[in-house]
Amino acid sequence: MADIIKLLPDSVANQIAAGEVIQRPASVIKELMENAVDAGAAYISVIIKDSGKTLIQVIDDGMGMSETDARLSFERHATSKISSANDLFAITTKGFRGEALASIAAVSMVELKTRKEENETGILVLINGSRVESQEPCSCPKGSSFSVKNLFYNVPARRKFLKSDNTELRHIINEFQKVVLSHPEIRFSLHHNDTEVYNLIPSNHRQRIIGVFGKQINQDLITLETETSLISIKGFIGKPENARRTYGEQFFFVNNRYMKHPYFHKAVGEAYQNILPAEAIPTYFIFMEADPSSIDINIHPTKTEIKFEDERSIWQILMASVREALGRFNIVPSIDFESEALIDIPVKSSLDPFPKQPDIQINPRYNPFDGDEPSFRKPDFMERFERENKANWEKLYSTLEKENGKQGSEDITETDRKFFQIKNKYIVCPVKSGLMLIDQKRAHERVLFEKYLECLSLNNPVSQTELFPVAIELNPADWQVLKEIENDLKLLGFSFHFSGNSKITIKGRPSNSGSSDPAEVLGTFIEEFKATQSGPLEGEKEKLATAMAGASAIPYGKILTQSEMEDLFDSLFACQSPNYSPKGKPVINIIALEELDKRFK
């Protein structure tokens, strides 16, 4: 029988590797930017056209390459970062596999210009689908310039599955942010279709975060800083009141390398327990420093999944560190966080399995009833709550008195229908078969969803013009979200003007948008839109209407008058599908009389 196993050609092997490493234009930018950082660049410029489909160019002023290195860098498993297997346990660079450039060259047309500082001329290398077309001297500045053109031109199936330009640009911005946040000492710029998206000067971590996400995030940042013998943790966490329902401002770094770590994410969430709603996601920018030999970054081709030697101990340290920072901000009760000294959280060691009992100095003769009362300083959060209670208790009493009077008048006046509110969340109405319970927020979402869907279908927007247009600055990724759906937002009733540097001016908003603050309406809509998942039978208009309904619906906790409950009831049952919210959750629940009778047996 003839042999059937054959060695794959290098071009085919490179394309297979590209499927793991290069998934979209953002993957190319990640790999090229990380190479530029490893080259010791002080300035890195990223230029893209058509969201990277036509051109991706990354220019740096790093060390550059010799003629031999420039040619060899495109070979598989050719790298300057490691030379033996032992080097895998002490990696401090971004890249080390030697797969990135070979994978990129396999699915695009690549032009490399590079020069070392000591050389008078540089080298130009042209590669087309893994095939070297030319290599010749050229004039160029110190450093390297990679131009990647027509990505996936020779893999039509991969190119066909790329998303819209705005979607791909959002992915590019996300990858760009991961690199620039971990290296604030480097100057970065990003241009798309000759428009400047970012121009970040060298700074510290806090200023870099502000430069990336806008000035408004500065007041949301709480400093995080913990030193232990196992790991160093620094960075910032967000205030609970500004937590969002979607991911986007959650970043973990270890040794200046971005990583995904769901286990550590749960540690941060645990620290926010009982002060955040279940669906809210806190903001955090956490930078860890660990011994390179205690982590393994060689478990995934993209090098974003990292394994720690002692994850359980780090989990505890991280949770304690976040809680300590929240305690400093008086979010959670604290004993004494006035000291500026860094805490050293002890970690159990295999060499010392039994912890030592701490020495505590006590006075056995102390009597708490002798002498004057000991001074006790209440935590700031308790004093704040007491002041607010004293200032507002009369208002609370007047509200209760008004509500009792209103309910009394309703009891006197007999009506055909009676509605009651439970916990300012559910509306209860007697029906022939028992009691009907209505979720007030979901009911309003259903009503608004069908109204917004009608506006989108009939091209008949109902807008409320702002007397004074409101200018706001957005995260560039959110700015791209709005840019992508600009025309549909106008059909919903929004009127705004896009300007450079991720700024937008709101001139009008939907008339039934709930809040009177257009910036709040738009911000809530963006979060709802990103959190809304389209079903298999739903289109973009359904997703837009669902997001807008979620952003505009009456919230839980809002007290409704009898007439408001009646109007909501009538509007709900005028809908085509009153039983379920736009997200498919139940709106109505009926407790049958038989069930009520059983409860009294």
Image (tube, helix red, strand yellow):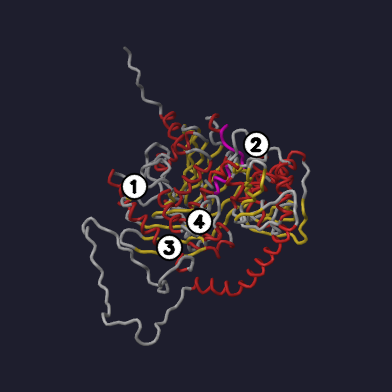
Question: How far from the left and from the top, in percent, is residue 365?
Answer: 27, 82
Number of the label disc, if any, that sits on residue 296: 1
Q: Give the quadrant of the N terminus.
A: top left
Q: Residue at x 53, y 41 (%)?
A: 25
**Callout 3 environment at 10 Å: few (<14), some (14 to 19), or many (20+)?**
many
Percent of width and height locating residue 305: 40, 45
Identify the disc placed on residue 282.
4
Left or right: 600 in relation to 84: right
Dots 1, 4 in contact, CB < 8 A: no
Earlier in the chain: of badge 4 and badge 2, it is: 4
Q: How far apart in space, not on screen, are marks 3 and 2 (Cα)?
A: 42 Å
Secondary structure type for disc 2: loop
Question: Is 544 or 82 nearer to us in this picture?
Answer: 544
Q: Earlier in the sequence, mark 3 or mark 1?
A: 1
Prevailing secondary structure class for the magenta stretch in the rendered image = helix
| x and y, in percent, of residue 89 in the image | 30, 48
Earlier in the chain: of badge 1 and badge 4, it is: 4
Q: Nearer the viewer, mark 2 or mark 1?
A: 2
Disc 4 residue crowd, few under 14, some 14–19, many 20+, Cα 10 Å = many
Q: In terms of secondary structure, where does tag 1 sit? A: strand
Residue 341 within the segment the image draws in magenta = no
